Structure formats: structure tokens, C-alpha cells
């Protein structure tokens, strides 16, 4: 956790929140309420939410307000994403969600030590900033974004470090999908410990 960007307990910088269908990874196709927090210092050149990077650009919203909206939606699952949500102390938010019977899921690049109570941890490391060593034992899901051919070897480096129960996914970066997806399909057929992840929400034209 980065103390410089930590927001004290009762509120967090919220870029957007919405009820939708999870489009990728292990929970692909599940109804999920997304809470996208502001702030990120990883700097992925192909990031499709660069407007999330500046933590100061997003209003502080109370945890009570966020949890109330998730509860009102009827969603059984809350996905905390960003930006890089692990920049913040997420214990109060996740505790409140779980107390309402809502499962908690984080999407993180793993560059900070995690705070919070998690039912599912999706670890998606990026080459632009190295992950914290602690994430490898905690991850339930390793999701590698494939932008070029060299990313397969890089994916295996991380797969060798996660725990044995961790689910392994390869996902084409959206702008390179037509080029990379055939390579991913061939790779998964040759290495069936991996699964294919697609951003199906973009195919379906939903957030």
C-alpha cells in the first residue's frame, strides 16, 4: 500500500461504479457490481482507462454509499478494480461488503501488498512495474495480457511462482486481439494448464 495515496477508512476515490456482466477471467459471464477506484502508477501503455490514473481527479465517495449501491443492485459479487485498487486500504470496504453477504473480488497488478478481505484475487501482472512478492501465494487467478509473442514466456515465469491452485488465463490485449488470439489458442492447446480469457463484454457492447 502506498501511504501517499491512501484514503482514510471512510471514503475512497471513485471513478465509476456499475452493475454489469463480468467479461473476462474466471468469473466471465457472472453478474457483478464493479467499483472502479481512482489512482494508478503502473503506467500500461495500452491501458483503456488511463483517466483512472490521477487519484486526485476522482471524488471521494463514502464506503457506506458504495456498499448500499451494491446491495441495492442485488449483485452477489463486487469486483474492486481500477486503476490499481491496492494503492488504498481496502479493509473497511471489503469488510462492509462481506457483512452484507456480498463476495469480494479484486483485479490487481500486484504491485502493492494487499489489504482487505477477499473471496477471489485476480492477479494480472504488468511489465511496466514488478509485482510484490506476497501476491504469488495469495492469487486465485493469474491473468496474463498477451500483447506480443514474448508474453508467453513471461506468462510462464509468473505461472511458476503462483500457488498450485491458482487458475491460469491468457487474454489478448484488445487492440491486438485478431493477431494474438490464434497464437493463444494454439498455445493453450499445447499447454492445457492455461485457459483462454476473452473480453466478452466488448463483444456484447456492455460496460
Image: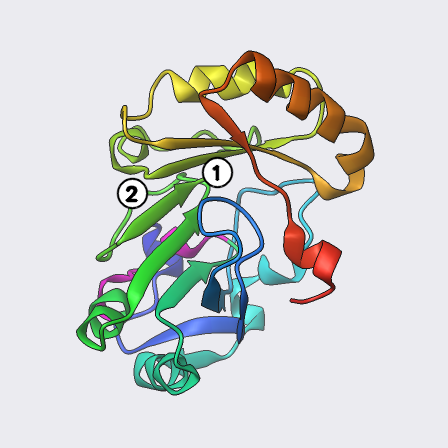
> Which residue appears at 58% of the width and 39% of the height?
197
Q: Give how far across and how far down residue 20 sits, in percent.
A: 55, 70
Relative image position of residue 206 (x, y in whole percent): 68, 67
Q: Earlier in the sequence, mark 2 or mark 1?
A: 2
Q: On the picture, is 75 further left or further right than 36?
A: left
On the image, the x and y values in percent for residue 126 come to: 54, 33
The answer, for residue 170, to whether it is visible in the render is yes
Residues shaded magenta:
84-92
Residue drawn at x 49%, y 25% as measured from the top left: 194
Image quadrant where residue 23 sits: bottom right
Which residue is located at x 43 percent, y 46 percent? 108
Front-lying residue, 175 or 182: 182
Number of residues whose C-alpha sits closer than 10 Å to that of mark 1, classed few (under 14), some (14–19) or many (20 or more): some
Which residue is labeled 1 in the image? 124
Q: How is the image coloured?
A: rainbow
Mark 2 in CB contact with mark 1 (< 8 angstroms): no
- State yes or no: residue 44 in magenta: no
Residue receiving disc 2: 113
Determine the secondary structure under disc 2: loop
Instruction: Name the image quarter holding the C terminus.
Output: bottom right
Does residue 89 belong to the magenta stretch?
yes
Amino acid at each position: 500500500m502506498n501511504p501517499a495515496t491512501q484514503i482514510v477508512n471512510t471514503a475512497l476515490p471513485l471513478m465509476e461504479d456499475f452493475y454489469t456482466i463480468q467479461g473476462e477471467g474466471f468469473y466471465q459471464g457472472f453478474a457483478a457490481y464493479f467499483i472502479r477506484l481512482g489512482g494508478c502508477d503502473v503506467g500500461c501503455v495500452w491501458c483503456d482507462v488511463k483517466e483512472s490514473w490521477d487519484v486526485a481527479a476522482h471524488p471521494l465517495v463514502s464506503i457506506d454509499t458504495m456498499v448500499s449501491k451494491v446491495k441495492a443492485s442485488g449483485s452477489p459479487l463486487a469486483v474492486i478494480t481500477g486503476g490499481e485498487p491496492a494503492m488504498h486500504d481496502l479493509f473497511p470496504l471489503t469488510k462492509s461488503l462481506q457483512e452484507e453477504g456480498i463476495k469480494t473480488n479484486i483485479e490487481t497488478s500486484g504491485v502493492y501488498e494487499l489489504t482487505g478481505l477477499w473471496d477471489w484475487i485476480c492477479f494480472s501482472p504488468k511489465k511496466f512495474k514488478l509485482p510484490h512478492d506476497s501476491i504469488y501465494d495469495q492469487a486465485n487467478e493469474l491473468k496474463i495480457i498477451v500483447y506480443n509473442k514474448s508474453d508467453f514466456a513471461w506468462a510462464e515465469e509468473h505461472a511458476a511462482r503462483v500457488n498450485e491452485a491458482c487458475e491460469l488465463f491468457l487474454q489478448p490485449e484488445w487492440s491486438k486481439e485478431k493477431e494474438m488470439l490464434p497464437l493463444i489458442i494454439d498455445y493453450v492447446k499445447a499447454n492445457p494448464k492455461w485457459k483462454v480469457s476473452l473480453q466478452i463484454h466488448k463483444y456484447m457492447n456492455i460496460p
